[in-house]
Amino acid sequence: MSKVKTKDVAKTKAQKSYEKGLDLEKRVDKWLKTQFDYKCTMRDLARGKVCKRPYEIDVHGIKEEVFGVFKTHLWVECKAYRINRVQVTKLIESAKDVKDLNNQGSGLQKWSPAMLMLVSGEGFDIDAIAMADKYKIYCVHASKNFEFVGKKNRANFENKESSF
């Protein structure tokens, strides 16, 4: 009987974790739309050159310029937990794979990210920030408010200084 209870507890924890992450994604989506006028899609898919299964992007932001002719694509990964360098590396490698397919000109992937962002509900460890700074990734701590951390700040973001 304790095995059944353990499964129920684990399922409840997993479900709560999923819901917490989804709530964070919704907050980020709203923040990007209202504060920065991005058009956003949650849970968008992007194909890569090496990996056959598409990557799931938590929030794909698009900023249109000059009558919609030029677009800046933003790839946002949201984590309800504290981010470490593993998540930074995963984002970099995934985005490079998508960019490689787009640069190939195959037409399978019609866009690639110009900017990368990691949003955490619990903050970042020191190695994650150092690695994100090296690769010019925006880091945002989403507690009560949204606070940029690291070298890439809000002014850089508003000016659409590309990262990655």
Image (cartoon, rainbow, N blue to C red):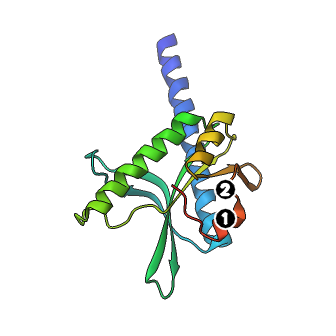
Is residue 116 in view from this perspective? yes
Q: In the displayed orientation, state which residue is furthest to the right.
A: 144
Residue toward you, 86 or 76: 86
Please state the horizontal and vertical placement of residue 118, each as a whole percent of the image: 58, 49
Q: In the displayed orientation, state which residue is furthest to the left.
A: 106
Please state the horizontal and vertical placement of residue 20, each as a whole percent of the image: 60, 44
Q: CA distance from mark 1 to mark 2?
A: 6 Å
Q: Residues within 10 Å of mark 1 (few under 14, many from 20)?
A: few
Please state the horizontal and vertical placement of residue 159, each as a whole percent of the image: 64, 71
Q: Residue at x 37, y 57 (%)?
A: 99
From the image, tell me which residue sits under label 2: 152
Figure check: 65 above or below 102: below
Q: Residue at x 47, y 17 (%)?
A: 4
Q: Residue at x 67, y 39 (%)?
A: 124
Residue toward you, 142 or 159: 159
Which disc is residue 132 wearing?
A: none
Amino acid type of the residue tagged 2 in the rendering:
Lys
Is residue 1 in view from this perspective? no
Tell me, yes or no, whether the two marked residues, 1 and 2, touch with CB atoms within 8 Å.
yes
Which disc is residue 156 wearing?
A: 1
